[in-house]
Amino acid sequence: METNLLAKEKVLQILNKLPDQFTIQRLEYEYYLINSIERGLKNSQEGSWYSQEQIKELIDEDKI
């Protein structure tokens, strides 16, 4: 399965919240935003996240 496929149900939920006229960029943004939030929540629940201090250390060490 291709990873860039959109979830139909998620797109329909977004469409229902948008005004009657909108740009495709707005739809893309809303979809991106929801996916980012869901991914962050999932990572947080799984404990796979970095603290701000850890990120600073990785940047200082040129690891990211």
Image (cartoon, rainbow, N blue to C red):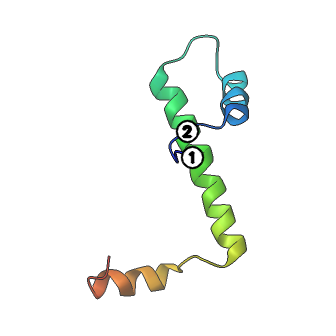
Q: Residue furthest left?
A: 62
Residue in the foreground of this view, choosing between 46 and 18: 46
Q: Residues within 10 Å of mark 2 (few under 14, many from 20)?
A: few
Q: Which disc number belongs to residue 44?
A: none
Residue type at the position of mark 1 = Met
In the rendered view, tell whether residue 31 sits above or below residue 38. above
* Residue at point 43%, 79% (across, down): 55
Residue in the foreground of this view, choosing between 56 and 30: 30
Residue in the foreground of this view, choosing between 46 and 52: 46
Q: Position of residue 47 (x, y in %)?
A: 66, 79
* Residue at point 50%, 36% (across, down): 29
Q: CA distance from mark 2 to mark 1?
A: 8 Å
Q: Position of residue 62 (x, y in %)?
A: 26, 82
Residue 34, quarter of the rendered image: top right
Residue 18, quarter of the rendered image: top right
Task: Name the secondary structure under disc 2.
Answer: loop
Name the residue that disc number 2 marks. Answer: 5
Task: Name the secondary structure under disc 1.
Answer: loop
Name the residue that disc number 1 marks. Answer: 1
Q: Residue furthest top?
A: 20
Residue type at the position of mark 2 = Leu
Contact (Cβ within 8 Å) of mark 2 with mark 1: yes
Quadrant of the rendering where the C terminus is positioned: bottom left
Q: Position of residue 17 (x, y in %)?
A: 71, 26
